[in-house]
Amino acid sequence: MYMKNRSRDEILMEILSGLDEPESRTAIMYKSRLSYAQLQFYHKYLLEKKLIREEDRRWVSTDKGKAFLKASLAASQILNDDSSG
């Protein structure tokens, strides 16, 4: 099965899209198809950028994280829209 490399933003969007409810590291790692090392990198990055916070060892999206996800999805939709001409 062919799998293209994902950009950092695509991975961030994938992680944040699964955080409507608090999620464990393990669940995020499997849902986002990340290695443990990648998960650690993104955990640190998301915390530094204040896109997530932790509650009882579970990740939760912040308002800033939700805004980032919404803007990223809108941008992705615009870029992938084939009907513009």
Image: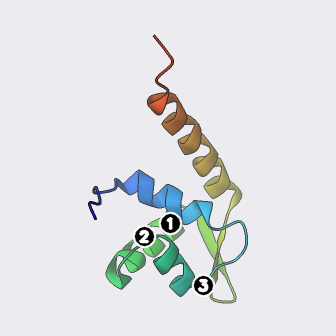
How far apart marks 2 and 3 lie (CA) works out to: 14 Å
Q: Amino acid at mark 1?
A: Leu
Residue at (47%, 59%) from the top-left corner? 12
Q: Amino acid at mark 2?
A: Tyr
Residue 67 placement, left or right of 72: right
Which residue is label 3 attached to? Answer: 24
Number of marks in the rendered image: 3
Check the image and name the residue furthest to the bottom.
56
Give the SS element for disc 1. helix
How far apart marks 1 and 3 lie (CA) works out to: 15 Å
Q: Nearer the viewer, mark 1 or mark 3?
A: 3
Which residue is label 1 attached to? Answer: 46
Depth order, front residue of 50/80: 80
**From what the image shows, is residue 84 above or below residue 21?**
above
Residue at (54%, 43%) from the top-left corner? 72
For label 3, the crowd category at 10 Å Cα-Cα, with few meaning under 14, some 14 to 19 and many 20 or more, is: some
Q: Which quadrant: the N terminus?
A: bottom left
Q: Circles 1 and 2: CB distance less than 8 Å? A: yes
Residue 11 placement, left or right of 15: left
Query: Which of disc 3 and disc 2 is earlier in sequence?
Result: 3
Q: Amino acid at mark 3?
A: Ser
Q: Nearer the viewer, mark 2 or mark 3?
A: 3
Give the SS element for disc 3. loop
Which residue is label 2 attached to? Answer: 42
Residue 9 image point, x, y percent? 42, 52
For label 2, the crowd category at 10 Å Cα-Cα, with few meaning under 14, some 14 to 19 and many 20 or more, is: some
Query: Which of disc 3 and disc 1 is earlier in sequence?
Result: 3
Q: Quadrant of the rendered structure where residue 40 is?
A: bottom left
Residue 66 image point, x, y percent? 66, 54
Q: Which quadrant: the C terminus?
A: top left
* Residue 51 in view: no
Depth order, front residue of 70/46: 70
